[in-house]
Amino acid sequence: MYKKKTGLVGIIITILILVILVFISNMNVENLSHIENVISTVVMPIQNGITYLKNKITGNNTFFADISKLQQENEELKQRNSELEANLRELEIVKAENTTLKEYLDLSEQYGNYKTKAAYIISKDISNYSNVFVINVGKNDGIENNMTVISEKGLVGYIISTTDTTAKVQTIIDTASTVSATLSTSRDNLICKGTLEESGMLKATYIPTNANLIQGDILETSGMGGIYPKGIKIGTVKTIQNSSNIVDRSAIIEPAVDFDKVETVLVITE
């Protein structure tokens, strides 16, 4: 008896499903859309609720909250990074200032026999024919034309013009520059000039015929010529250029000062 009732119920359910399918298949698209909307309205809240419960169980409900927190932390890190960069720039400035002050002190101690004025280079006019610096001291600081300019390594040049607050320095490697020099070993005198043959170098000429010129020999200012004091290092003999006529021999001199890197100088005021 029970099996007969169960079979009857199955037949009724099957008939109802077939009727519904026939009914839906005969409906037009517009009516079908309305039904879909109704079904969606009923089903979506249920689906959302099930999704929420699922996320609650698995912990996914904190995903968006975590994203918001990460964004906030990212902004805070960016702000902190900007502050650290600013602090780093300030430290670099202080470090540079300390380095400059140390260079001033070292120069003052090295050339304690002279009365000097410390300065730093604010611009450079460098070309194949000229090599001129501008420094941050001038007439107001007691700077005058023809004063000698030196660095920690040796001779830089001399003052060729001034304003109230700046001065222009013609370096010894300028092609218009001439320095009377003395060889440290033989004490022979010769002339050093800026040269176009090798950039950044000096050329030694008027070398005495009996002078024993040695590669690596040191040249100093001779004290003659009316501009440079005696005994300031100029550079060293790099190469010797012999000639069939010994009177015409010359030498290339590497300056003691690296003119590409020099920043701090002293002006000898007395």
Image (cartoon, rainbow, N blue to C red):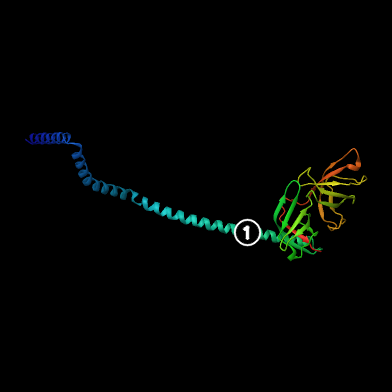
Residue toward you, 217 or 192:
192
Q: Position of residue 129 (x, y in %)?
A: 76, 47
Quarter of the rendering containing residue 17: top left
- Total numbered circles: 1
> Residue at point 46% right, 55% down?
75
Q: Circle 1 sits in a helix, a strand or a loop, which is it?
A: helix
Viewer-side residue, 243 vs 48: 243
Q: Position of residue 248 (x, y in %)?
A: 89, 42
Q: For the view shown, which residue lies furthest in the right direction?
A: 210
Q: Which of the 4 image quadrants contains residue 123?
A: bottom right
Residue most extreme to the left: 1
x and y percentages locating residue 254 in the rendered image: 79, 47
The N terminus: image quadrant: top left
Q: Is residue 30 above or below residue 232?
A: above
**Residue depicted at 74% across the width and 57% down the height:** 168
> Which residue has dot 1 on it?
93
* Image quarter (top left, top right, bottom left or bottom right) of the C terminus: bottom right
Near mark 1 (Cα within 10 A), the count class, few <14, some 14-19 or many ≥20, is few
Write the residue at 24% across / 48% down: 45
Q: Position of residue 210 (x, y in %)?
A: 93, 45
Residue type of the residue flagged with mark 1? Ile
In screen coordinates, is 159 left or right of 122? Answer: right
On screen, residue 241 above or below 180: above
Residue at (67%, 60%) from the top-left corner? 98
Name the side, left or right, on which 7 lies relative to 226. left
* Residue in the foreground of this view, choosing between 168 and 252: 168
